[in-house]
Image (spheres, coloured by chain):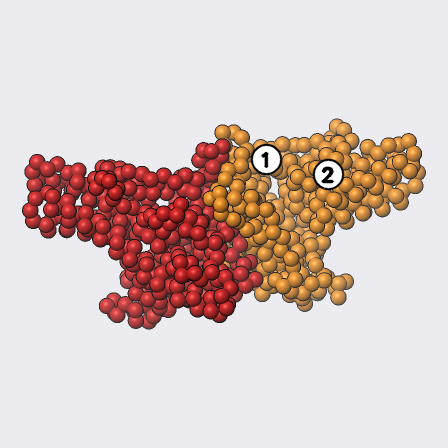
Chain colours: A orange, B red
Amino acid sequence: MNIYGQHYRTIWVAENNPKIVQIIDQRPLPHDFIIEDLTTVQEVARAIKDMHVRGAGLIGAAAGFGMYIAAVTAPKDSQTQFIKAVQTAAETLKATRPTAVNLEWAVNRQMEAISQVEGDYTKKIQAAYETAVAIADEDADSCRRIGQHGVTLIEEISKQKKGEVVNILTHCNAGWLAFVDFGSATAPIYAAHDKGIPVHVWVDETRPRNQGARLTAWELGQHGVPHTIIVDNVGGHLMQHGMVDIVITGTDRTLYTGDVANKIGTYLKALAAKDNNVPFYVALPSSTFDWQHRDGVKEIPIEQRGDEEVRMINGLYNGQIIEAFLTPQDSPAANFAFDVTPARLVTGLISERGICAATEKGILDLYPDKR
Amino acid sequence: MNIYGQHYRTIWVAENNPKIVQIIDQRPLPHDFIIEDLTTVQEVARAIKDMHVRGAGLIGAAAGFGMYIAAVTAPKDSQTQFIKAVQTAAETLKATRPTAVNLEWAVNRQMEAISQVEGDYTKKIQAAYETAVAIADEDADSCRRIGQHGVTLIEEISKQKKGEVVNILTHCNAGWLAFVDFGSATAPIYAAHDKGIPVHVWVDETRPRNQGARLTAWELGQHGVPHTIIVDNVGGHLMQHGMVDIVITGTDRTLYTGDVANKIGTYLKALAAKDNNVPFYVALPSSTFDWQHRDGVKEIPIEQRGDEEVRMINGLYNGQIIEAFLTPQDSPAANFAFDVTPARLVTGLISERGICAATEKGILDLYPDKR
């Protein structure tokens, strides 16, 4: 999407030097826009581990490009040494975010691509390059198609409202910054905006890490999409007063029964949507489906993170990004990172394959290959 | 309640000098504990206006003591000048927070007390002193009785759980810092704790002004009540997992039909409580009832405050309380201060008169004088 009027992805190979991979360093956003060069596997690993890049789709793409950098930088003295270096890189990259499914998948795909090519190093490097680009392109294309399907929902509301602004509420950042381009929850919004449908987005700030206020607001603003930041407490009030036409969120894991795990607080917005007859949609690439588990609340383990994310906050002070302390010194804090929204509260799911009900039947009708 | 092991109220006359009123300056809490001397009407007015003190009960008490200071400092040359000074003080105090009902009520009560006394200035000052103390004592007593009634709910849960810790969730600060002592929502909690019933409080941080993380956590901690701070997104997850036994909040206005206006986000917690069969109670002194309106969502106007409360945050940095910027420079923010929880989501109300259902019948049975 656009930044300062120019099209960007979240990761790419430098135009003038194919040995450099470039990313948007997401840590200082929205206060600073910094493009970072990655030229070694260690730099890519650190970028993933320390969350210069984050989000399932983007982590996968970064791992793909990391393996390309591994091939570029591996010693070319012997076949054995080359393969050994690439294998070491694979282990290094996999260890950065052990629970990120896309990361392991991308690394394995690269290992296969690199080892299957016969011939000299140039050909192996070329294969790694093509695979990295393919992983990124596939991610972007998948999100683009989520947008194509999801935009029909916004178009329908726009028609019902006779062209009045369609108000969309979203939680956390399921935007293009979490993928290679377009995003998941934001893809239908960007598609509507780019088609000239008037939209306005209520952006939940999404405590404790403020991905909404920091990232979603920034990317919407840069692309020119009208939006307003609200604290996480506000959505229910807006829905009571007819100020939200549709909720669209992303998800970290969605069961084939329709239960949705997503950023903490999503469940509360889904309850309010249900109570006020506001449609509640979840956008996801197919890779986010969990085909094993049936009961989200009982079966999905919820990560607890450090209490410092609740007790401190990052912000800009005197031109510097600092961390301020918010709570009494002696008060403990708990930090549950996700919650589960039961399928009964979810109106539908939007994937790159289409839109379906958040029910076992609805999902398996769209994915007959999973029956 | 206790601070550093010593009993405090939020406002009192200095022990060694009856011409000084003292308050806890609540602005630097929880980072600094500062007692402020008030010796002029202007100082009292500024303390109310700039929120050194806040909360319906405490604002009323501060206005009462402000009128006492007015009598102490008024010129004693002539009856006319004395009364004129007291009247000017009354107008000054009333103008500080024009929508605070208790403020006007306390000032008027003082005007009547002062003007009804016959005789010299000493007697009028004595009447003003006694009235100020009476207003404060009545507020504290009312909260104490809310505690006596509300503690029965906690005792009942404690029995059902065979003495296991009772987990209570609260939102915002309806604690003793908002009143003279005990608080409204916290009164049953302090009563239970002081009786030796094991309790633990989940404290919603309550964005955007963080009254939970700053004030509720601090006052619970100072009184020794076990508690954990959570971001506002977490309560639903806790209730899904049986980690909340009862929700108790305060209210800014409760209709005689049972609809509850309270700090933004209360409605979302009430929805989650209903969805998980967790009892949801609202504690209030009788003065908070609105006997005029029937439909909270339609009829209660919701204050919108400045966007800087969403875009900036107060915190401690390098030993200083600073304001940090959280959002993109160009992203607008909206700041709705309250929401309305419909009566159907409220299990019951706790006032100094007792506990009743949040229905017109339940409320009027407890207040037959309002029929």
Residue under numbered circle 1: A28
Splitting the image into 4 quarters, where does residue A47 fall? top right
If the image is split into quadrants, where does the C terminus of chain A sit? bottom right
Say what secondary structure mark 2 lies in.
helix
Amino acid on which the number 1 mark rests in the picture: Pro
* Residue B325 percent across, percent down from the top left: 49, 36
CA neighbours of label 1 inside 10 A, class few (<14), some (14 to 19), many (20+): some
Task: Give percent across and percent down for residue B42.
Answer: 24, 37
Residue A91 image point, x, y percent: 79, 43
Chain that bears disc 1? A
Of all residues, the one furthest to the top in this rendering is A16
Kind of element beneath mark 1: loop
Residue A55 is left or right of residue A87, and the answer is left
Residue A215 in the figure: left or right of residue A293: left
Amino acid found under the numbered disc labelled 2 = Ala
User: Visible in this render: residue A188?
Assistant: no
- Measuring from the top left, give residue A62's x and y in whole percent: 72, 41
Asked if B54 appears above or below A11 in the picture, the reply is below
- Of the two numbered discs 1 and 2 on the same chain, state the one appearing first in sequence: 1
Closer to the eye: label 1 or 2: 2
Does residue B53 appear anywhere in the picture? yes
x 75%, y 42%: residue: A93
Name the image quarter holding the N terminus of chain A: top right
- Say the numbered circle drawn on residue B283: none
What residue appears at the point 70 percent right and 49 percent down from the top-left corner? A100
Callout 2 crowding tier (Cα within 10 Å): few <14, some 14–19, many ≥20: many
Mark number displayed over residue A45: 2
Identify whether A173 is placed above or below B365.
above
Q: Residue at x 35, y 67 (%)?
A: B355
> Mark 2 falls within which chain?
A
Indicate the quadrant where residue A281 lies.
Answer: bottom right
